[in-house]
Amino acid sequence: MAWHSGRDGEKFSIETPRAQNAELVLSRRPISPTARPSRTVVYRLFKPILFLLRAETAHRVVMRLLGWLACLPGGLWWLRMLYSVDDPVLRLRAFGLELNNPLGLAAGLDKDAEAFEAFGALGFGLVEVGTLTGEPQPGNEKPRLFRLPRDRALINRMGFNNHGAAAAAVRLKRRRRGSFALGANIGRTKLVENERAIEDYVKSTRSLAPHVDYLVINVSSPNTPGLRALQDKESLAPLLQRVRATLDAEVPARRIPLLVKVAPDLVDADIDAVAEVALELGLDGIIATNTTIARTGLATPASEIEACGAGGLSGPPVAERALYVLRRLRAKLGTQVTLIASGGIFDGDAAFERICAGASIVQIYTGLIYEGPALPQRIARGLAQRLRQAGFTSVEAAIGVDVAPPRPSA
Ligand SMILES: Cc1cc2nc3c(=O)[nH]c(=O)nc-3n(C[C@H](O)[C@H](O)[C@H](O)COP(=O)(O)O)c2cc1C
């Protein structure tokens, strides 16, 4: 198998047994937008008004709107009519779950599980709520969320503002049947020290386990002091073991997949160590990656970036690094652990690239803010088109066809 990635417009030639050795010519031409104009036009009109508001206020407005739509009789049906995605080429099985498509809502947008059904109706194959913590907490002082429109990026230092895992569990319990997989992402309460972090994660796990299809351990947010130290092998292994045991004890009737979400800022040795822990403990999946603390490659003036202050950067500027971490994990893990890609995915081309690099699922967050609710459908259709053009009959057949290990990072 050979895969040649290259500059814009360059042609790619792939030979892969899964594509029946077809000579595949893939150009970097953007795929024609496939969501109907009316769906995108509405957001184009609405976006300037939203962008006049502070980023967090705009977020609250949209969450209220979605929550309200989900409660209206026929509201979810209407969203599904407009936005749902049903294409057999996109169906897959990942960590034991049957998924309609490999598009996921990344954690952080629906922290308190207030509108997860509405997000499901927007066409996502998976919706991840959280990050939820063992105790309710207000998060960092506002303002704590900033837009960088020139980079289509965000900087946030939300600090896991949420009403706690137990409160979210009450809402998750009321879940009606939907065609999406529901995940919960859990983190450490700020006031709990790392030495007692395991108890906090276990507490959240107990509340959430009966109501979710998968669980994610977040040890990678840059906005909770000391949290990322839990990515060290010595801290991570006992944490994952205890949470695994809790999941099995709380819900003995089914195996709930357990995943960990890592930072893009890990050095190679730490990425490899996470991969080792995943293999040793039989972890179901890894999400690569969270936001970055780096501020490189931005078109926004330095003074504006500095004015935002500390926090995690998301959107296109994190894409390259997230792809690097994904490739490195795939090279270390082979096919034994499911990978989820997150970081700067805005179109079907990027989704296709991450899947070929080894991801089974791709998650989005910042893209939704800049492109609106039709984005999941647009990415799904673009991805389906790329898969078919490349001769794949299913998304599963494309996972990891481009597994060349990346060059070590500087
Ligand atoms: C405002 C904001 C809040 C976030 N909160 C969380 C969070 O609570 N837990 C988490 O695991 N990731 C969180 N993330 C990270 C996203 O889930 C995602 O991994 C990251 O933004 C990269 O994807 P993107 O470029 O598509 O946004 C947050 C991101 C943003 C922009």
Image: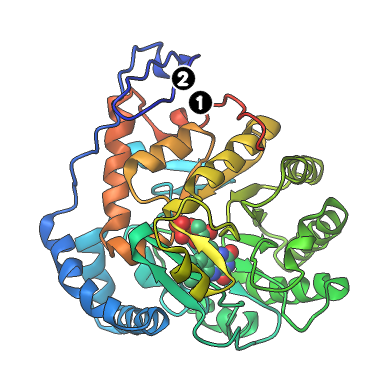
Mark 1 vs ligand 1: CB under 8 Å? no
Instruction: Bin the neighbour count of mark 1 within 10 Å (Cα to Cα): few under 14, some 14-19, many 20 and up.
Output: many
The quadrant holding residue 249 is: bottom right
352 sits to left or right of 209: left
Q: Quadrant of the C terminus?
A: top right
Mark seen at residue 3: 2
332 sits to left or right of 175: right
Instruction: Bin the neighbour count of mark 2 within 10 Å (Cα to Cα): few under 14, some 14-19, many 20 and up.
Output: some
Give x and y (percent) for residue 215: 63, 61
Circle 1 SS class: loop
In-front residue for pair 30/330: 30
10 sits to left or right of 326: left
The amino acid type of the residue labelled 2 equals Trp
Give above or below for 140 relative to 309: below
Q: Which residue is mark 1?
A: 402
Give x and y (percent) for residue 24: 33, 17
Tags 1 and 2 touching, CB below 8 Å: yes
Which residue is pictured at 65% across the width and 66% down the height? Answer: 222
In-front residue for pair 156/276: 156
Report how far apart the C-alphas of labels 1 and 2 lie in the structure.
Answer: 6 Å
Give x and y (percent) for residue 123: 32, 58
